[in-house]
Image (tube, rainbow, N blue to C red):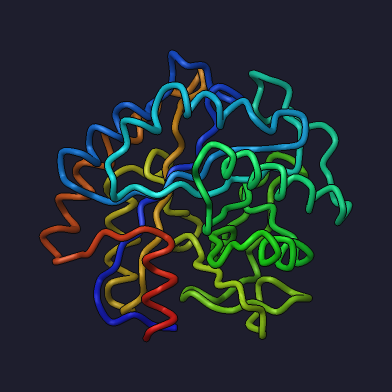
């Protein structure tokens, strides 16, 4: 599903206060940059089985009312249970289809009850399973971004392995293999990557993102980039908002359009 224009989707995986302390939350900085440049951002709001409401309620109290109108709320599911605040200490990874469906529907219902109907989704740590496709479709999710070609995040069983995946453009997945094309209604828009570098702003910095976006512009494909809403106590990387601003300026020089996940889905359906 190639898209001819340079369309860029900035996304935020939210995990404060579940994985990051409020003192290390960068949501205010990301919102400020979004407002300054009028750039659309899709916020994936975290939920898992033991903490289905903690992040949603934190954002409801602190940030939803500050977000520009062109920002979008999506759903961010985790199927493991991290021991706060050690976000990589994982217990009880859930692979049962019924449990995973319940995580999706609980997160979806929680957002809807607060006035936000998500139509976009991302599974944390690329840990999507093929069985999730029908769960997402049942919840009314039209576009997902839970894969990234050639990427394996490592560390623990809750991290997905996309090293064998070759697809870079958005695609309809196979119900039995979400990393292959098929006839599902759901659209998957992979996170942009190049080699072993995944398009996470605070992971690879401006120069790493520049290489990734230049590669995707040359291919004529939409670009999906990621930020997290916080930093761990031991993390000395730049805050995502500090990388976001120069990336926006560079992409503006290229004539890019900044769109949400649902905008991308609509463009692909009409293409």
Q: Is residue 215 left or right of residue 113?
A: left
Identified at 63% across, 51% down, the residue is 123
For the residue pair 33 and 125, the one nearer the viewer reads as 33
Please say if 178 is above or below 72: below
For the residue pair 216 and 195, the one nearer the viewer reads as 216
Please say if 260 is above or below 205: below
Q: Locate the C terminus and report the quarter of the image it occupies.
A: bottom left
Identified at 39% across, 28% down, the residue is 63
At which x and y percent is residue 69? 28, 46
At which x and y percent is residue 81? 76, 32
Please say if 2 is above or below 253: below
Q: Is residue 185 left or right of residue 195?
A: right
**Quadrant of the rendered structure where residue 243 is?**
top left
At which x and y percent is residue 235? 47, 23
Q: Is residue 8 left or right of residue 142?
A: left
**Quadrant of the rendered structure where residue 129 is?**
bottom right
Q: Residue furthest top?
A: 23
Please say if 80 is above or below 172: above
Q: What is the count of numbered marks?
A: 0
Identified at 62% across, 78% down, the residue is 185
**Quadrant of the rendered structure where residue 33 is?**
top left
At which x and y percent is residue 131? 79, 65
Q: Locate the N terminus and report the quarter of the image it occupies.
A: bottom left
């Amino acid at each position: 599903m190639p898209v001819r224009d340079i369309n860029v989707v900035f996304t935020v995986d939210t995990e404060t206060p579940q994985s990051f302390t409020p003192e290390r939350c960068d949501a205010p900085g990301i919102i400020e940059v979004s407002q300054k440049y009028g750039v659309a951002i899709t916020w994936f709001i975290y939920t898992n089985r033991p903490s289905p409401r903690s992040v949603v309620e934190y954002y409801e109290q602190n940030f939803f009312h500050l977000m520009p109108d062109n920002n979008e709320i999506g759903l961010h599911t985790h199927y493991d249970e991290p021991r706060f605040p050690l976000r990589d200490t994982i217990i009880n990874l859930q692979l049962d289809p019924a449990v995973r469906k319940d995580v999706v529907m609980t997160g979806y219902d929680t957002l809807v009850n607060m006035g936000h109907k998500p139509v976009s989704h991302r599974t944390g740590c690329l840990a999507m399973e093929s069985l999730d496709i029908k769960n997402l479709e049942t919840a009314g999710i039209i576009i997902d971004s839970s894969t990234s070609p050639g990427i394996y995040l490592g560390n623990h069983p809750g991290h997905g392995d996309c090293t064998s995946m070759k697809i870079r453009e958005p695609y309809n997945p196979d119900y039995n293999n979400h990393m292959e094309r098929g006839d599902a209604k759901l659209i998957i828009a992979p996170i942009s990557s190049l080699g072993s570098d995944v398009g996470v702003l605070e992971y690879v910095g401006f120069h790493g993102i520049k290489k990734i976006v230049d590669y995707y512009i040359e291919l004529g494909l939409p670009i999906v980039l990621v930020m997290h809403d916080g930093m761990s106590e031991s993390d000395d990387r730049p805050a995502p908002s500090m990388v976001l601003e120069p990336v926006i300026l560079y992409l503006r020089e290229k004539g890019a359009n900044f769109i949400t996940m649902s905008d991308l889905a609509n463009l692909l359906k009409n293409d």
